[in-house]
Amino acid sequence: MEMFKVTKVCEVKEIMDQNFSSYDLPSETIDILNAQGRILSKDIYALENVPHFRRSTVDGYAVVSADTFGASETLPAFINLIGDAHMGEHNQSHLCSDKCMYVPTGGMLPEGADAVVMIEYVEKFQDEIAIHKSVAPKENVMDIGDDIKQDQLLFTRGTKIKAHHLGVLASVGITDVDVFVKPKICILSTGDELIDPKEDLKPGVIRDINTYTLSGLCTELGCDVIEKKVVKDDFNNLKDTLKSFIDKSDLVLLSGGSSVGTKDMTPDVINALGSPGVLIHGIAMKPGKPTIIAKINNKAVLGLPGQPASCIMAFRVLGEYLIKNLLHLNTHEELFLEGVCSTNIHASPGRETYQMVTIEESSDGYIINPVHGKSGMITLISRAQGYIKIPMNKEGISVGEKVKVYLF
Ligand SMILES: Nc1nc2c(c(=O)[nH]1)N[C@H]1C(S)=C(S)[C@@H](COP(=O)(O)OP(=O)(O)OC[C@H]3O[C@@H](n4cnc5c(N)ncnc54)[C@H](O)[C@@H]3O)O[C@H]1N2
Ligand code: MOO
C-alpha cells in the first residue's frame, strides 16, 4: 500500500502562496454599514482633516496661554470674558490678550486662542474670570488634523473591516467602500456511512458533522457557503459533484476519503478532473496528515480528513490560510495568549502537533491543560478553548513550560 510522503506545514503554505495568492476575486462597492468583516479591495485615503477646526477637549475657557503664566491659587490671573461658544456653531470670534471665551467640550475655539483652562480652575465673575492654574500652549486643544490628516493613507487593500474602521470612515465622510466579493465556497463530504442529521439513525451509519462545522468556519471567515452536500463513495458521483462545485465556486472543501483505505478515492477523483490536480497529499501535521491541496481550472480544492476533529484542525491551519490568501488579507494574525503547561505533553516526532487545551486563570497567570481524545471525537474540539503548536523537531512540552495558546 502506498504510504504518504509528507510535506512540512511551512512548505505547504509556500505552495499555496505560489498557486493561489494571485487568485482574482472581483470587487464590489457597498455601504459601510454592511462592510463589517469584509476585506478592502482598494487603499483608502482621507479626503479631509479630522478635526477640520480647532476643538476644545474640555469644558473651559479658551485663552491666550501666555496670559495665564504664573497664575496660582494665591495669585490668580484675571481675564475678561467676551462670551460663550456654542456646539455646532461656527465660532467667528477673535481673541486677543487678556480676553477669554467659554467653550464646551468639542466646541470650536475662537481665532487667537491657543489653550483652554478647565472650568474647575476658574472662578467666574460678571465680566471676567479668575484663573488659578496656568496652561501651556495647545493644552486641552485638538488641532486641525490632529486625529487624521487630509490625504493620509487610512487603510490598505487587504484590511479586514472592524467596528473602529467604520468610525474612521464615518469621520471623514466615506460611506461606501470597495471590498472583495465574498469567496464562494462549496462543501462536499464523502462516505457511505453518512446521513443527514435530520434522518433516523440505524447501526453502521453516523450523522454528518463536517459539512456543518466547515460551513460555520467559512462563515466566520466572511465566506459565502453556496452549497453543501454529502455523497456516497462512488467515483463517478463524486467526480460529477466535485466538477459542478469547482465550476460554481472559488474554493471547494472536501472531507473524507483522503487516507489510504480501499474506498479512499478522493485523490484519484481530483486528478481525473484536470491538471495539475493534486499538488500535495500528506502533510507533516497531527492531526491532519492525509490532507490534500489541489488545483483544478485555477481553483483550489482542499481535501480534509474525515475525522471531525482532524477536519476542523486541518481547516484552521490550512483552510484559513488559503482563504486569507484568496481574500488578499494583509495580516495572518492569530489571537493567542501565553500560559504555563500543567503537565507534560507528548508530540509526534516529524509532525507539527496541534494539541487541544483548556485555559485556567490563576493568580500567577494562565494554566494550560491538555484535552485528550481521539480525532474522531467532535468533543475533542468543543471541550477545548484553543490549541498549542508543538514544532516537528520537539519531542513534547514539559510541565511548567511556557506556551502560546491559539484561541478558537
Ligand atoms: N491504514 C491507515 N488508516 C488511516 C490512516 C493511515 O495513515 N493509515 N490515517 C488515519 C488518519 S490520521 C485519518 S485523519 C483518517 C482520515 O481518513 P479519511 O480522510 O480518508 O476519511 P474517511 O476514511 O472517509 O473517514 C474517517 C472517519 O471520519 C468519519 N467521517 C467522515 N466524514 C464525516 C462527516 N462528514 N461527519 C462526521 N464524520 C465523518 C468517518 O465515518 C470515519 O470514521 O484516516 C485514518 N486511517
Ligand atoms: O492525522 Mo489524522 O488527521 O490523526 O486524525
Image (tube, helix red, strand yellow):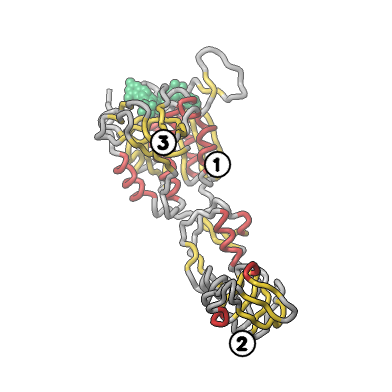
* Nearer to us in this view, 149 or 146: 146
| Residue at image mark 1 | 225
Q: Earlier in the sequence, mark 3 or mark 1?
A: 1
- In the rendering, at what x and y percent does residue 121 appear? 62, 69
Q: Please tell me in which quadrant of the rendered image residue 170 appears.
A: bottom right
Pointer 3: residues within 10 angstroms few (<14), some, or many (20+)?
few
Judged from the image, the quadrant occupied by ligand 1 is top left
Tell me which residue sits at (36%, 40%) in the image.
Answer: 277
Three-letter amino acid code of the residue under disc 2: Cys
User: Assess mark 1: CB under 8 A from ligand 1?
Assistant: no
Residue 393: x %, y % from top left:
24, 35
**Above or below for 159 versus 270:** below
Is residue 386 positioned above or below 39 on the image?
above
Under mark 3, the amino acid is Asp
Residue 167 vertical position relative to residue 192 in the rendered view, above or below: below
Nearest to viewer (mark 3 / mark 1): 3
Which of pointers 1 and 2 lies earlier in the amino acid sequence? Answer: 2
Disc 1 and disc 2 in contact, CB within 8 angstroms: no
User: Disc 1 or disc 2, which is closer to the eye?
Assistant: 2
Mark sitting on residue 96: 2
Q: Is residue 236 left or right of residue 95?
A: left
